[in-house]
Amino acid sequence: MNEAMRPGDWVLLSYRLPREPSSPRIAVWRKLKRLGVAQISDGLVALPADARTREHLEWMADEVQDGGGTAGIWIARPAALAQERELAAAMAEARAAEYRAVLETAAAAAGLPEGERAAAVRRLRSELQRIGRRDYFPPPEREQARRAVAALSGTSEEARA
């Protein structure tokens, strides 16, 4: 696979795993979720194309095959701009929900004693990093969550930049 990727391209992973044993199927599903893929249909997921996302999905294809399944990697682009917008919007909404959870946790942690609050800040910063790794189309909630965690830690946004 050495074709050049262009703006608007997506990396697709088509895969099929046997129902039993279920552990490889569950492991693949969890890893795909951590990558933040767009689920196009059963056994077909996509990420915006770049060298990193392509490599991630190639590794996932290897893992599917190691688990007794079949997998293929495709570079493609939606036939209509509306389809691409739909994929991007679905991915952005999934990340927005994760950022809203960070906002809720930060608000709940505001009343904690200092030591517990500091531990909550560490957990929330780690969570922001995890979400950020799969945030291809950042929603407004991202900046809100960052500000909430910075405020919880007592640091200014400028100090964190």
Image: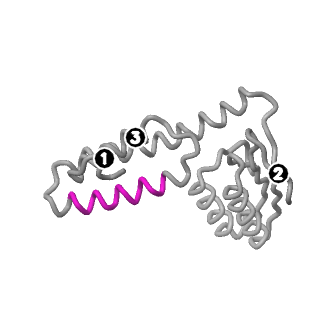
Q: Main secondary structure of the magenta part?
A: helix
Residue occupied by mark 1: 158
What secondary structure is marked by label 2? loop
Q: Earlier in the sequence, mark 1 or mark 3?
A: 3
Q: Neighbour class for label 2 at 10 Å: few (<14), some, many (≥20)?
A: few
Label 3 sits on residue? 143
- Residue shown at 83% from the left, 63% from the top: 70
Residue 110 drawn at (x, y percent): 20, 48
- In front: mark 1 or mark 3? 1
The amino acid type, in three-letter code, at marker 3 is: Glu
Residue 38 image-quadrant placement: top right
* Near-viewer residue (115 or 64): 115
| Point 42% across, 37% down: residue | 141
- Asked if residue 79 lies in the magenta stretch, the reply is no
Residue at 66% across, 36% down: 87
Q: Which mark is residue 4?
A: 2
Q: For the N terminus, give its image quadrant.
A: bottom right
Q: Amino acid at mark 2?
A: Ala
Asked if the residues shown at circle 1 and circle 3 are in contact, with their CB atoms under 8 angstroms apart, the answer is: no
Looking at the image, tell me whether mark 3 or mark 2 is earlier in sequence order.
Answer: 2
Q: Nearer the viewer, residue 48 or 111?
A: 48
Q: Residue furthest bottom?
A: 66
Magenta span of residues: 117-131
Helix, strand or loop at mark 1: helix
